[in-house]
Amino acid sequence: MKSVVQVAVLTLASSLAFAGPKIAADMPASTPDGMVEVIVQYRAFSDRGEAAARIGHVHRTFRSIPAVHMTVPLSSLASLAANPRVAYISPNRKTSGLLDITTQTVKANELWQSGLDGTGVGIAVIDSGVAAHKDLNAKDGLHSRIVFSESFVGDDATDNYGHGTHVAGIVAANGSQSTGSNFTHTFKGVAPNANIINLRVLDANGSGTESEVIAAIDEAIALKNTYNIRVINLSLGHPVYESFTLDPLCQAVEAAWKAGITVVVAAGNLGRDNTLGTEGYATITSPGNDPYVITVGAMNANGTPWRSDDKIASYSSKGPSLVDHVVKPDIVAPGNNVVSLLASPNCTLATEYPDTLISASTYEKSGTGLSSEYFELSGTSMATPVVSGAAALMLQENPSLTPDAVKARLMKTASKHFAQYTSATDMHHTGTFESAQDIFTVGAGYIDIQRAVENTDAVNFQALSPVAKYNAQNQTVTLVSADAVIWGTDTPPSGAVIWGTAVIWGTTNLEANAVIWGSAVIWGTSFVSDDAVIWGSAIVWGDAVIWGTSVPPSGGLQSAALNDGDL
């Protein structure tokens, strides 16, 4: 198992209730100079002009959401929040950088033979940059498929960290540097002829800020028609501090979704985190908690192209989300020990974590020493571009698909055959990690790209991830429409059924009010008794940790990659 970085578990901050104050709970109480960088959301785009009249400095006015990034005196926050045109104020949160077997496992290679390879589809990789690599060249070998690059971190858009290039390779590498009679493995991405739009938001240490991510999403929307951007890949996220209806990053991904761009987001790598006493449940990160986007968890393919030995990676974050209890992840894909493109042997990840490097002899018959082309990472960051590549193949085959159609078809066709429990060990830890492969761990199932492309079901509804609703009287949990959260009511629309069909969730009777805790069907054809585990055996539903006013972890935006993988 390769050595990788663990996402730190940081201190706790108080959570913000849905109808709470306009100032985020994680706003600092003081700063050395009395100033603070914030993202101010307004109720309407026309209201943003008043920001210039405020004491402080406007750094950026966003295009996709009615918000600005500015520096203001801490002492002025209260008066700013009192402005009726202001909807919400949050700090500019810090960000940091969270195949051959993989593509066979998800059945992408079977589609390449029919000509589906992502040709013409643009995928925006919002990450640490994407380095020029021959595997990202066009079929002629001369022209790069990185068709546009822009940095939001103050320098060029190359990848000094190494994370974004690895992600881009999983999406779209053509395997040219590992193809031929001298090679035993070809490391090819899911959509090996798709175009990459490189939007850099993380620096050489894998850090940045939330405002830069929102600005990159703005740019992707603006460039959508120019480069046929149909997919955004976000292998990053930060802890949930408030409802997705208030979180500016969630609002930005929703804007992209509504603009016709399928947004694919990593679930996070906190599945082993028991800080809240939840055995890793309720650890989905933002913006993966947004009900619009496709949130991806990580599977361990165990080094084989067949699925029979695959299991959930114990580090993969589990739902439901804090505050809103959105059922996440939506789908799972291979993310453990994935070999993909190496930006440079001198990139930060390669130099600080040399165990991520692989021997050239791994794939080259005459190879010696360490590879200068490929290396290996684990995490939900690696699973996310598998789904982004799948979306590109679906959109090449049918360009008229909406983001909702892509999401619904991926989830409906996902394999739902899981053992109820799995265990995993890790050479960097003692003990064994137990996982229940339930609806909050594997979502709607394990991606099957071939079935998703072949599916022709009409999708004339919003494919919003549902919300888990707890009934304290009978200690049951049901799935309800996310509209109940968006519109601030506990009552879903009359006769509402989750996406109009229970097939999405792999059951024949899982409708809007079907009980998923207690005696109802969870997934597949399995029935559970009153004490069965959909949530985790250590969870007490009456606790305030999940359903009351729990305290989420504080800290910056994290890459959802680089956690210890499972053996």
Image (cartoon, grey):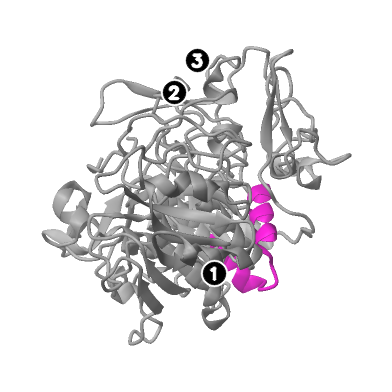
- The residue sitting at 70% across, 26% down in the picture is 516
Q: Amino acid at mark 3?
A: Ala
Circle 1 is placed at which residue position? 63
Q: Are marks 1 and 2 in contact (CB under 8 Å)?
A: no
Going from the N terminus, do you reach mark 3 or mark 2 first?
Answer: 2
Give the total number of marks visible in the rendering: 3
First to last magenta residue range: 390-413
Left or right: where 84 falls relative to 553 = right
**Would residue 315 be counted in the magenta stretch?**
no
Tag shown at residue 538: 3
Going from the N terminus, do you reach mark 3 or mark 1 first?
Answer: 1
Q: Amino acid at mark 2?
A: Leu
Q: Main secondary structure of the magenta part?
A: helix
Circle 2 is placed at which residue position? 276
Residue 257: x percent and y percent?
A: 62, 61
Residue 159: x percent and y percent?
A: 27, 66
Per the image, label 2 sits on a secondary structure element best described as loop
In the image, 447 versus 226, the foreground residue is 226
Q: Nearer the viewer, mark 3 or mark 2?
A: 2
